[in-house]
Image (cartoon, rainbow, N blue to C red):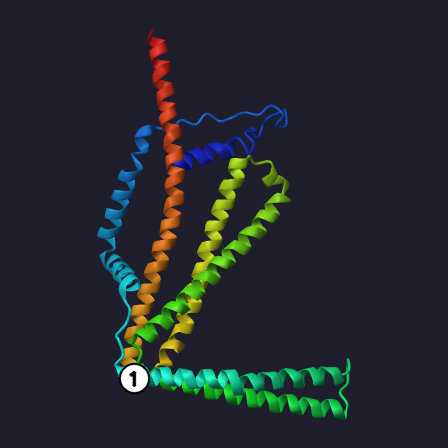
Amino acid sequence: LQLRKTVMAYNAYGRHGRHPGDPYGGRVQRRAEIKLNIDDFPPLSTVVTTQARNFVQRRPITTALWAVGLLLAATATGCTADEVARMRYEAALDKADHIIEGELRRAREGVRKAEADYYGLKGWFSCNEACQRAWKTVEREQANKNRVEGKVNAMIQSGKVEVGVWSTFAVQDVRKSFWDSWESGKEFAQRMTMWDAMFMAFSPRDRDEGLAGVVIQLVLRYLTNLTLGLGAAFVYFIVSVYGLIQSYGPSLASSLIFFFLVLISALGVLAAYIGGIWGVAGGAGYLMIRKVAEQQAMQDGRSRREHIE
């Protein structure tokens, strides 16, 4: 409530401290005198403890799921496959690698060569008989590449079925998929913040802000972009991870249980990270406001003592 009053008082005097009815057009700047009561701003540790306790009391199930998700994300490694299953899995991967390095590489090179020949014969708006023959070659090479890729995928999946979805191999694949999506979300936030900084540099309104104001705006925009990027990455991960789970050939019950555990683990990490960065930013702003309130309280105390004397 006190912060809302502060913002309203700031807006009443305009963006640069100018009263709306100022006849000087802002040449004489005024600053609103905002009084903050130190009693309205208890220590940050007290605020955090109180809010955390209230949240746990109001949402015990959500808190329990969040804690379980974090625990799974930190400690879950999967079940160790038996020696026979592990050997079959590794043998399937070795065969797939052999196909990738040999037959699939040649098939991809054939597609690239056929496409180069086709585009070399194709005109802007026409395709003669030689061009059409080249296009049929492209289709043949593409079909061959798809066939070899299907063989590789079938070979890998046969190895995954041997170890199962609860194995350490499946958990490692899920973790890799999650962190790859996570990094893509962070890269999105960095790119968008860079563009925001460029637009701020060319904006007259933002150039009028002081250095502290620009830094605060950039930090808030980065946090917003990071929240959006990680949220989108989380959605992409959840959509794609179900197919990854199915590649290990589990039963319907196992796939649903495993998917639910992956969901709460990913949500736990995301909520902890997003809540942590925004909590740090909010805590820093709260400490700044509380410092101002302490300074005003000290000034008021000195003024009262001087008046008494």
Where is residue 279 drawn, in percent x and y? 36, 46
Where is residue 12 drawn, in percent x and y? 51, 32
At label 1, counting other C-alpha atoms closer than 10 Å, the crowd grade (few under 14, some 14-19, many 20 or more) is some
Residue beneath label 1, please?
85
Label 1 sits on a secondary structure element that is: helix
Q: Which image quadrant for residue 200?
A: top right
Q: Is residue 263 left or right of residue 153?
A: left
**Quadrant showing the N terminus:** top left
Q: Is residue 197 visible?
A: yes
Q: Is residue 19 left or right of residue 275?
A: right
Say if 201 sits above or below 92 in the image: above
Residue at point 40%, 82% (across, down): 93
146 or 113: nearer the eye? 113
Residue at point 34%, 62% (across, down): 267
Say if 302 sits above or below 9 in the image: above
71 or 30: nearer the eye? 71
Say if 28 sits above or below 74 in the image: above
Residue at point 35%, 64% (across, down): 266
56 or 30: nearer the eye? 56
* Three-letter amino acid code of the residue under disc 1: Ala
Where is residue 18 drawn, in percent x and y? 57, 29
